[in-house]
Image: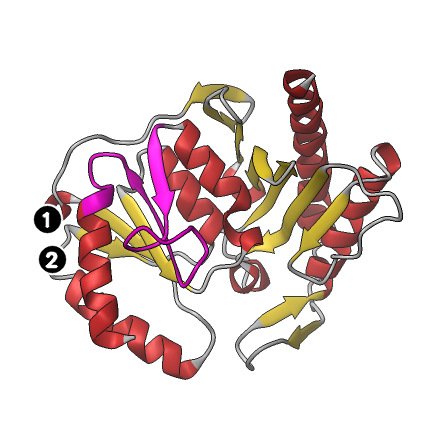
Amino acid sequence: MTESLNQSLLALALDIAKSTSEILVNQRPENMAYESKSTPVDLVTEMDKAAERHIVQRVKDVRPNDSFLGEEGTALPPENPSNVKWIIDPIDGTVNYFYNHPYWAISIGVEVDGEIQVGVVAAPLLHETFYAIKGGGAFVLHDGVKKKLQTNSGASIEKALLSTGFGYDAERRKKQGALLAEMVVIARDVRRAGAAALDFCYVAAGRLDAYYEFGLYPWDFAAGSLIVTEAGGRVGGLAGDKLGGDWSLAANADLFDEVDQLVTKLSKKYF
């Protein structure tokens, strides 16, 4: 029963990601309306809201009793909730989307009985959709061609390509920048591309060795974390903390502990 449910949830999530991608690409206005959220640089656009409404409605059309947790405020449970919750970020990387930078994605994680069972991350302008089902491996569709994902193996942090991100609060950014200044002279290099869900997927695909960030939310990592673990990687917080506590970390299995120890040490210095 669980396997067939997960397969049907995956099929629905993939279909919704596709239709949402079409809306965000084809209906993107030239002069986009937006608002500021937590700070002036933290944007939410009219398309974030439209995409989240679309995702929620598509799910409700098929599964009216499922619950939602969405970045743009969709959280109200139905009267008779099922054991399924959809954790969605309609545009992960809103600033990138606003500037028409291609590194943004739709992130859909599906939780059953409190555990993520399905993850889909679609990057329309990169022509890629990453997905995983619990116990079934992780894959990427690139222009319709399916490939199994596998994280890198080995490598010390000195030979590792890392990624990170910054919050929107100025004081937090100062701390993150100070930590980064030390990290960048230790690792092979560090990237900051601006979409957490895709950073998780790039670890899964072996395009990054590790990713760390302070202050993520469930919609940032629900889908991507499953994709990493199904590709053979590890996810978590620092020093044994849970994923999505203060810190979130994803890495290939051989490198995880070393990155964990370094970021833990530096976080104590700056946070």
Density class for disc 2 (Cα within 10 Å; few <14, some 14-19, many ≥20) is some
Q: Say which quadrant the C terminus sits in.
A: bottom left
Q: Which mark is residue 107?
A: none
Q: Position of residue 46 (x, y in %)?
A: 73, 64
Picture quadrant of residue 208: top left
| Element class at badge 1 | helix
Q: Which mark is residue 186?
A: 2
Indicate the quadrant containing the N terminus: top left, top right, bottom left or bottom right: top right
Secondary structure found at label 2: loop
State how far apart marks 2 and 1 are (Cα): 6 Å
> The residue under label 1 is which amino acid type?
Glu
Q: Residue 222, relative to residue 269: is it above or below?
A: above
The segment highlighted magenta reads: 232-257
The color scheme shown is secondary structure
Residue at numbered disc 1 = 158
Q: Are marks 2 and 1 in contact (CB under 8 Å)?
A: yes
Mark 1 surroundings within 10 Å by alpha-carbon count, few (fewer than 14), some (14 through 19), many (20 or more): few
Name the spot of residue 203 as percent of width and height, x first.
35, 40
In the displayed structure, does residue 167 sit left or right of residue 98?
A: left
Tell which of 151 and 32 is nearer to you: 151
Which residue is rendered at x = 68% and y = 35% of the image? 18
Magenta span includes 254: yes
